[in-house]
Image (tube, helix red, strand yellow):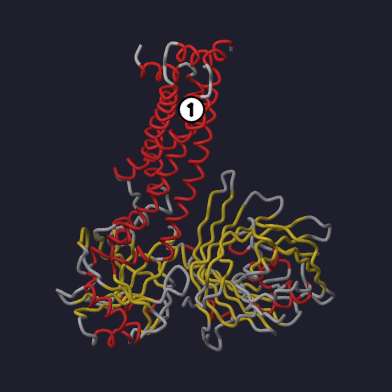
Amino acid sequence: MTFFTIVLRSLTRRPVRTCLTLVGISIGIAAVVTLVGMASGYEKGIGKQLDVVGIDVVVSNMSGGIMPKMFDAALQQKVAALPRVAETTTVLMRMMSVEDAPIMMISGREWGGFTWHQMKILEGRMLKDGSEKAVVLGTLAAELLRKKVGDTVQIETEELTVVGIVDGRSMVENGTIFLSLQVMQEISGEEGKINFLDIRVSPNTSKAEIVQLCKDIKDIFPEGRAMVANEVVGTSQGFRVVRAMSWSTSLLAIIVGVLGVMNTMLMTVFERTHEIGILLAVGWRRRRIVFMVLCESALLGLLGGIVGVGLGVLGLITLGASPGIRGFIEPDINVKLMLIAIAIAVVVGVISGLYPAWRSSRLTPSLALQN
Amino acid sequence: MNPTLRVFLHAVIGTAFLVSEAHAQEGVLSARDLAAQLSNIIQDGSSIVRLRMDISKPGGGGKTVLQIQVKSRRTKSATDLVYQVLWPKDRKGESFLLHRSGGRAPSGTVFTPPDSMVPLTAARMREGIFGSDLAYDDLAENFFAWGNQAIVGTEEVDRVPCQILESKPGKGDGTSYAKVRSWIDTKRMVTLRVEKHTDSGKLAKRIDTTRVSKDDTGRTIGSSFSVQRSGQDSVTEIEGSNSKHGVTFPVDGFTPEALRALK
């Protein structure tokens, strides 16, 4: 019988208890994978959207609610005149419930602006011009609304014809309804208003020059904020909150897992006092006993981690397909997160085994054998 | 101590849609002051609000989803409301108008396309709007302005400490309810729950605020609600989509004729 056979046998001796402990730890790990995977998917989705659209700097006024506050579209001319600004385009975006679908993104984009360029027409056609009272739908938006080319979509008081279905090349873009800025402003009664000004800078612009550009924009638009596109996600308070919440909720689940493993290992040590006494009597060192208990708890953690990752991935797939999330967030199922989750589970196992291991090392062979 | 906190409240669907972030006074407000503040906040001028209304009728009754546009003009002396169905297509244009001035009973008109224009009688005021659990009465009355107000306790709603304000109608306050209890988050001045009771003391209707968010003016408001009538298994979920304040309506914007046009 080898050392690891002893470790394995101690876990299989009480299969129900071992399984229940595994369930406890795997729920904790599943929570880590699911919550962090969703938060990360949300961040990546926004990041990818900015990336595929080719936006370098975003100007908005985030002091409002979920969507930025509206501001005067005349800002575009002032910003366009700043050095290093190659292109600007304006957007009026809203999040609202459309027909019987849940809240979705409606993006009124300046016709001819660069934000239209990355879209690939899959069916139908693009808008004819900025005044056409029509929409194109991202693939997911079309699916959610159950619309095809030629149908109409009710936005505010207007019925707009669906003229095309596009691949926006990111989850966020694909879940969006697109129309021209002019039409969006008309139907929402917000003529001359926008809530995003997107900027492309000249090629070879250094990071320092982009930062300076953001400062210059702040000078002419003090109530708003210009942000470098790839920093939007990292610096956003909202994203930080989402990240913190997902990790803190996961932490709670992990603590429950720790207690479960600790309880199981303590029970194991108490039940095996006699066995440990024999091992000590036949010459095992205390260090080896400690190592054995730690190996058992680490193995519990590892198995719980693997099961938990499986459950977490399943949770991510289910959540990603659920109404309300589909089209907004593409769950981030990545190997790195899975490995981190398994590593956490093993560490959790080892930490949970520390106290039981210490208890086992305190046993004396004579007393243990008496028991 | 004179810390005045800004008080906001917004009424989207009558008194059920009680809003807002507040500059509540740090000291405990008296029932009368609290009600007065809430009543004042409801008078938030002219606005247009978009709503999604889900009416669920379990037991084979199915589910109805409506997109609704609400135009409102609220002043201290009068309230005018127009509700218009935007979607689904087959119900587009269904609408009604409600008017209430002073302590008088509300009046109104219901329009069903293409031509049906029916006045709202007193009896019909208790019926649900568009087949929902929310009655015309609920939209028109302002129980914070009633003669008798009392704070009858405190309770947490979704872990938010609330004061329970009990409003009873005075002589001139025409209403079908004997008392209304509202759970007020005094820190943000948002009503998180409303319970309406009949003369016999039975609970007739309960309105829960299910989401609190900021409106177009930056005020914190109750933006989603769940309405349930006692003894009925149906539930109406109302989700505010967006709002716009400071709107200028045409002179005839709140007349029966205006119901014919959807804009």
Q: Badge 1: how crowded within 10 Å, few (<14), some, or many (20+)?
A: many
Judging depth in this view, the residue of A78 and A287 nearest the camera is: A287
Vertical order, A29 against B102 (above or below): above
Q: Position of residue A110 (x, y in %)?
A: 28, 77
Q: Would you identify the image quadrant in which residue B79 lies?
A: bottom right
Q: Position of residue B218 (x, y in %)?
A: 52, 76
Q: Horizontal placement of B135 versus A327: left or right? A: right
Q: Residue at x 20, y 81 (%)?
A: A84
Q: Residue at x 25, y 70 (%)?
A: A55
Q: Residue at x 55, y 74 (%)?
A: B219
Vertical order, A252 against B184 (above or below): above
Q: Horizontal placement of B212 versus A58: left or right? A: right
Q: Would you identify the image quadrant in which residue A197 lies?
A: bottom left
Vertical order, A69 against A166 (above or below): below
Q: Which residue is mark 1?
A: A357
Image quarter hosting the N terminus of chain A: top left
Vertical order, A271 against B123 (above or below): above
Judging depth in this view, the residue of A337 and A137 nearest the camera is: A337
Q: Horizontal placement of B235 versus B69: left or right? A: right
Q: Position of residue A308 (x, y in %)?
A: 41, 36
Counting labels gives 1
Badge 1 element: helix
Image quarter hosting the C terminus of chain A: top right
Q: Amino acid at mark 1?
A: Ala
The chain letter for the residue carrying disc 1 is A
Q: Position of residue A98 (x, y in %)?
A: 42, 63
